[in-house]
Image (tube, rainbow, N blue to C red):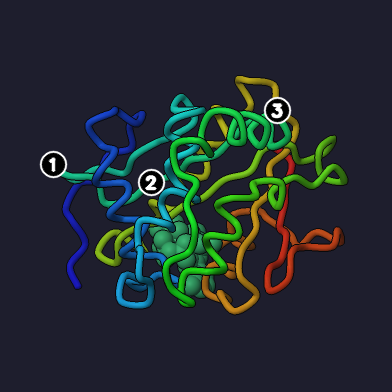
Amino acid sequence: MTAPAALTIRPYRETDHDAIYDICVRTGDRGDDISEQLHDPRLLPDLFVGPYLALEPELAFVLAAVHRPVGYILGTADTARFVAAYRERWLPRVARPSQAPSDEWLVHLLNRPEWMSHPELADEYPAHLHIDLLPEARGNGYGRALIETFRAALRTAGVPGMHLTTGVSNSSAQRFYRRVGFVPLPQEPPKGAIFMGQPV
Ligand SMILES: CC(C)(COP(=O)(O)OP(=O)(O)OC[C@H]1O[C@@H](n2cnc3c(N)ncnc32)[C@H](O)[C@@H]1OP(=O)(O)O)[C@@H](O)C(=O)NCCC(=O)NCCS
């Protein structure tokens, strides 16, 4: 696969919204497209993308080719504050019942944002993030550049550290995260996940 010639990192704009949703679905199965596995593929971006774009758009950055986004990083500076805002302002827009067994785990997470809340991480690593690149944008240093962009924004905001949750089975992403400074955290993660963190 050929990498796009020149990609740029820039702040998120509202017109990027649908493209970011699309990238989330197309990378949702450990980097592969998840749409065939879910009855309602929009569940994934409504959980892992939409609330950040709505609640903390200033912490969302887009990796863009000339005419379209090909990747993103987004997150929150303060997970506890984010979870409260999600429940109050985001959940009323997206809450829904599961319509198929395939979707039950995501609906469960979507409707109960407190799964993201980990008081034991709040002092050292209050921020958390999500990052996804389309296949053609990977392997060229842009993931690292996006992490550094996010780090700079957190530093400006005076945030001491960031964490992330990734699937135990996503060993490829874990190798990337280690290369860009994250280390596994000893705190007990949700089932099937691991916590990684680093100072900002
Ligand atoms: C994971 C991801 C964000 C990495 O972005 P990327 O642009 O491919 O990574 P970079 O090219 O910036 O790599 C940065 C460093 O990590 C290393 N790295 C990246 N992916 C790696 C992998 N799968 N295995 C080992 N090392 C890896 C690179 O070799 C590089 O090392 P160096 O800078 O020390 O030489 C991207 O591949 C992706 O979006 N994957 C699919 C979606 C996904 O899994 N997202 C995370 C969900 S938790």
Q: If you read the primary sequence from the N terminus, does the residue marked by circle 3 or circle 1 appear first? A: 1
Are there few (<14), some (14-19), or many (20+) residues within 10 Å of tag 1? few
Q: Is mark 2 within 8 Å of ligand 1?
A: no
Q: Are marks 2 and 3 in contact (CB under 8 Å)?
A: no
**Residue 145 picture location, percent across and down:** 44, 45
Q: Is residue 23 left or right of residue 167?
A: left
Q: Is residue 16 left or right of residue 116?
A: left
Q: Is residue 190 above or below residue 130?
A: below
Q: CA distance from mark 2 to mark 1?
A: 15 Å
Question: What residue did someone put label 3 on?
Answer: 159
Q: CA distance from mark 2 to mark 3?
A: 20 Å
* Residue 129 appearing in the image: yes
Q: Is residue 109 left or right of residue 184?
A: left
Q: Residue at x 70, y 28 (%)?
A: 159
Task: Please tell me the numbered disc located at residue 66.
Answer: 1
Q: Is residue 129 above or below residue 167?
A: above
Question: What residue did someone put label 2 on?
Answer: 72
Kindly state the secondary structure of the residue where label 1 is placed.
loop
Q: Amino acid at mark 1?
A: Val
Split into 4 quadrants, where in the image is the N terminus? bottom left
**Residue 108 picture location, percent across and down:** 60, 60
Q: Is mark 3 within 8 Å of ligand 1?
A: no
Split into 4 quadrants, where in the image is the C terminus? top right
Q: Residue at x 44, y 36 (%)?
A: 93
**Residue 20 picture location, percent across and down:** 31, 46
Q: Residue at x 44, y 28 (%)?
A: 57
Q: If you read the primary sequence from the N terminus, does the residue marked by circle 2 or circle 3 appear first? A: 2
Q: CA distance from mark 3 to mark 1?
A: 32 Å
Where residue 12 sits, quadrant-wise, is top left
Kindly state the secondary structure of the residue where label 3 is placed.
loop
* Residue 149 appearing in the image: no
**Residue 179 picture location, percent across and down:** 59, 61
